[in-house]
Image (tube, rainbow, N blue to C red):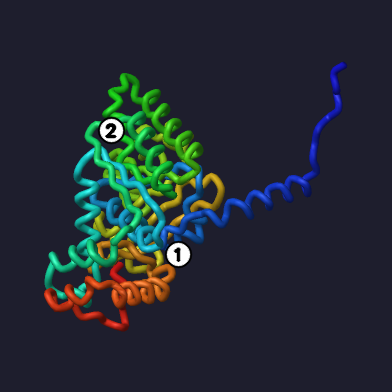
Amino acid sequence: MKDNTLTYISINEALDQFQSQIKVKCPYAIETGLKAMDILTGGLFPGELCVIGARPAMGKSMFIFSIISYMVWKEIPIGLFSATDSMNVNFLSRLVSSVNNSEIPYSYEGKLRLLRDVVLDEVPLYLNCEPRMTILSLRENATKLKKEKGIKCLFVESIQALFDSEENGNTREGMERICRELKILAQELDIPIVVTSELNRSPEHREGIDGTCPQLCDLRSSSAIESNADKVLLLHRPEYYHITMDENGYDLRGIFIVIVAKNKYGSTGEVRLRFDPCKCRVIDVDGSVHDKEERDSKLKSLLEENETVQMLTDKLGLELDNKNNSPF
């Protein structure tokens, strides 16, 4: 006999269930190191697909580098996948250049040796450069990294490169499939996947600070990306378009804007950050960095305990500045 009993719960019971899920998920959110953005978005959550879109010269690589360098310093296992050599080369070059100049004032080689022998010793950062990388090869390598190295986050450059490698005949259907596969992979591995995306030229043809700001519809294959992504971050530098002041008279020189255009589980809005050209990264407007005291103390201890330090000090003339020991 069929049971026609209705199954339901009250709104209070539903809220209790939701609260219990939040308590489980929140501790596993990964901070980006950018306080203003973490406050707005909550960080990067396991199982989510985050898309970062920007026009050329907006600082997309620097933005990603800022997040990765923070995670590296927090010893969070990360995978960085690229279909070209440029992403890995650019990342490593920025990493070397970001070492504090007060610690190694002259030698680029010295910075490289410090990173290799002291700072990045056994750091869980894994690079994969595969020309014509497909979604299948990405899945295989990411799954292997998760199993063998326990990666907590995966960065991929770029979603259009994946599409081109697949040689899909239909742009919309092909991009829809790739986005869906990336989302499924994030859920299966229970890690956030962050992928970059190109924008079309629409912002170049609009005027004013609001006109040049990127929008969701500016994403290439925007409907496929928008429907599958949990977060969409669009990057904007008004100064690139010769806009140096906003409507309220705020100085926009050196300002880096992150537009949270989609946030499935949180707020949308705009975050203003600032370029730090000396360290090749993006920082909060007030110049603060998450856990700076902890990082400074950790580096000082690391340098004092590592046997390589004396050799580097003797050969490279390395002098530590006690007021600022953080390399990033």
- Residue 193: quadrant of the picture: top left
Is 25 in front, or is 180? 25
Q: Residue lying furthest front in this view?
A: 307
Q: In which quarter of the image is the N terminus?
A: top right
Residue 37 x %, y % = 45, 59
Q: Please tell me how crowded label 2 is: few (under 14), some (14-19), or many (20+) other residues with Cα within 10 Å.
A: many
Amino acid type of the residue tagged 2 in the rendering: Met
Q: Please tell me how crowded label 1 is: few (under 14), some (14-19), or many (20+) other residues with Cα within 10 Å.
A: many
Residue plotted at (40% across, 66% down):
248
- Residue 245: quadrant of the picture: bottom left
User: Label 2 vs label 1: CA separation?
Assistant: 33 Å
Residue plotted at (37% across, 33% down):
140
Element at label 1:
helix
Element at label 2:
loop
Q: Earlier in the sequence, mark 2 or mark 1?
A: 1
Is 213 in front, or is 287? 287
Q: Residue lying furthest bottom in this view?
A: 322
Residue 56 x %, y % = 24, 47
The residue that label 1 is drawn on is: 35
Q: In which quarter of the image is the C terminus?
A: bottom left
The residue that label 2 is drawn on is: 133
